[in-house]
Image: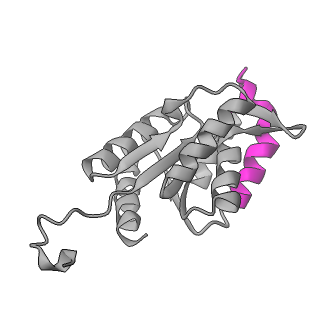
């Protein structure tokens, strides 16, 4: 007997565990919106809310969470975010998670980038401020360039988060 023998309204659909990655402080509200959308659609969110940015051992826990996930989603805004030194190079957790999920764990992934106009505006604001992230201007730009070459890439702005969430749900249905 297989699931086609049952009425489709009682057959459990595939539940995806979705790992969400981003610079936490900058995109807190967007992350919350994605998490709520994932939960409302009966999928399982995963991400840095379970961890605190700290040290290299902690990244091993994050890698395990990515391994256990079905899909990796990155929100890439204008800030590089919390960093860690790995193999002598300083990288953001978001970039390390992206590299691990896409290159080593080979997870299907969706990348959401802050649209270019808002990115430029926000980077200009950062450059004029005391924000520690201004020293990472080159790194965030290089990371965005790499992320733009991803499997599924879309742009978001603060005004289109609802469409971003619908986009994510659509891709969860076809992954």
Q: Quadrant of residue 31?
A: top left
User: Measured along the vertical axis of the image, is residue 86 above or below residue 54?
Assistant: below
Is residue 79 visible to us here? Answer: no
Foreground: 30 or 175? 175
Residues drawn in magenta: 126-147
Q: Is residue 94 left or right of residue 114?
A: right
Does residue 77 sit above or below 173 in this rendering? above
Apparent side of residue 26 relative to residue 134 in the rendered image (left or right):
left
Q: Residue furthest front?
A: 1
Position in image of residue 76 (x %, y %): 60, 47
| Residue sitting at the far right | 88
Q: Quadrant of residue 163?
A: bottom left
Using the rendered image of the protein, determine whether residue 117 is visible from the camera's viewpoint: yes
Q: Residue at x 62, y 46 (%)?
A: 119
Question: What quarter of the picture does the C terminus occupy?
Answer: bottom left
Query: How many marks on residues?
Result: 0
Task: Choose between 121 and 16: the one closer to the eye.
Answer: 16
| Magenta region includes residue 41 | no
The residue positioned 34% from the left and 49% from the top of the image is: 38
Is 43 situated left or right of 21 in this image? Answer: left
């Amino acid at each position: 007997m297989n699931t086609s023998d049952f009425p489709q309204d009682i057959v459990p659909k595939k539940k995806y565990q979705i790992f969400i990655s981003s610079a936490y402080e900058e995109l807190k509200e967007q992350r919350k919106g994605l998490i709520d959308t994932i939960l409302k659609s009966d999928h399982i969110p995963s991400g840095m809310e379970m961890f605190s940015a700290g040290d290299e051992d902690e990244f091993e826990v994050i890698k395990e969470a990515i391994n256990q996930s079905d899909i990796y989603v990155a929100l890439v805004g204008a800030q590089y975010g919390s960093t860690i030194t790995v193999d002598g190079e300083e990288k953001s957790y978001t970039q390390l998670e992206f590299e691990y999920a896409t290159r080593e764990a080979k997870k299907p992934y969706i990348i959401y980038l802050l649209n270019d106009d808002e990115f430029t505006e926000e980077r200009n604001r950062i450059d004029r401020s005391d924000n520690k992230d201004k020293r990472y201007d080159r790194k965030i730009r290089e990371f965005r360039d790499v992320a733009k070459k991803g499997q599924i890439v879309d742009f978001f702005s603060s005004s289109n988060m609802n469409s971003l969430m619908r986009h994510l749900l659509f891709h969860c249905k076809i992954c």
